[in-house]
Amino acid sequence: MPPRFRAALLRLGFNFYPSYRATGGRVIHVSADLRTIRVMLRHSWRTVNPAGALFGGALYAATDPMFAMLLALQLGDGVVIWDKAGHIRYRRPGRSHLYADFHVDADTVEAVRRDLAAHGETERVFRVELRDGQGRVHVELEKTVYCATKAHYRAKLAGVD
């Protein structure tokens, strides 16, 4: 399948997947190399709190799977990937649509591959900001993503170290 079709299929898949769609977030761009995803969180009656600002749960949920997905797309089927931790810092109330650009660069992917080859598992911390249309930061998000080879993960689950 041509890369641009994979990117379009991923974008559509996210936007029509029920649990992601319910967050109010929309994937508005996926790069052809599957290393970058742009998300928009709409400011609408479905995503605001009683004070009229974007609901914190919607802010987190719309961003939740992106770094794990980008790593999974780069590393392939032989790797188990889980979101391990998340930290969100609210800088100012979101009273308009907010945007986040998620990117996993080639150097990070290669470092993960090296760690997996050497240790069987690794963790990476990624950061992203949600910004309004004028570029003002409203939310800072930090995600910790766990990666392991399938063999290492199975052995770990079985209690074999």
Image (spheres, grey):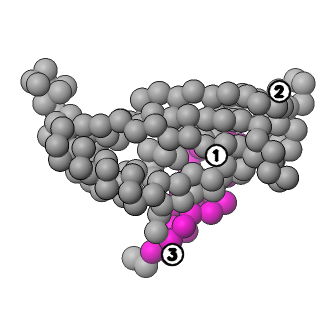
- Whether residue 128 is visible: yes
* On-image quarter of the C terminus: top left
- Residue contact at pointers 3 and 1, CB within 8 angstroms: no
Indicate whether residue 4 is drawn in magenta: yes
Q: Residue at x 49, y 46 (%)?
A: 67
The kind of secondary structure element at disc 3 is helix
Near-viewer residue (122 or 56): 122
Q: How crowded is mark 3: few (under 14 residues within 10 Å), some or many (20 or more)?
A: some
- In the image, residue 49 sits, relative to residue 45, either above or below, namely above
**Given the current orientation, which residue lies at the most extreme left position?**
160
Q: Residue 69: x and y, percent?
A: 45, 49
Closest to the camera, between mark 3 and mark 1, is 3
Q: Give the Cα distance between marks 1 and 2.
A: 18 Å
Q: Give the Cα distance between marks 3 and 1.
A: 22 Å
Q: Residues within 10 Å of mark 1 (few under 14, many from 20)?
A: some
Chief secondary structure of the magenta portion: helix
Q: Residue at x 80, y 51 (%)?
A: 135
Q: In the rendered structure, which amino acid carries the disc numbered 2? A: Asn
- Give the quadrant of residue 139: top right
Q: How crowded is mark 2: few (under 14 residues within 10 Å), some or many (20 or more)?
A: some
- Whether residue 149 is visible: no
Indicate whether residue 11 is drawn in magenta: yes
Q: Which residue is identified by label 2?
A: 49
- In the image, residue 126 sits, relative to residue 110, either above or below, namely above
Magenta-tinted stretch: 3-32
**Given the current orientation, which residue lies at the most extreme top position?**
159
- Residue 4, disc: 3
Q: Residue 32: x and y, percent?
A: 50, 71
Q: Which residue is identified by label 1?
A: 21
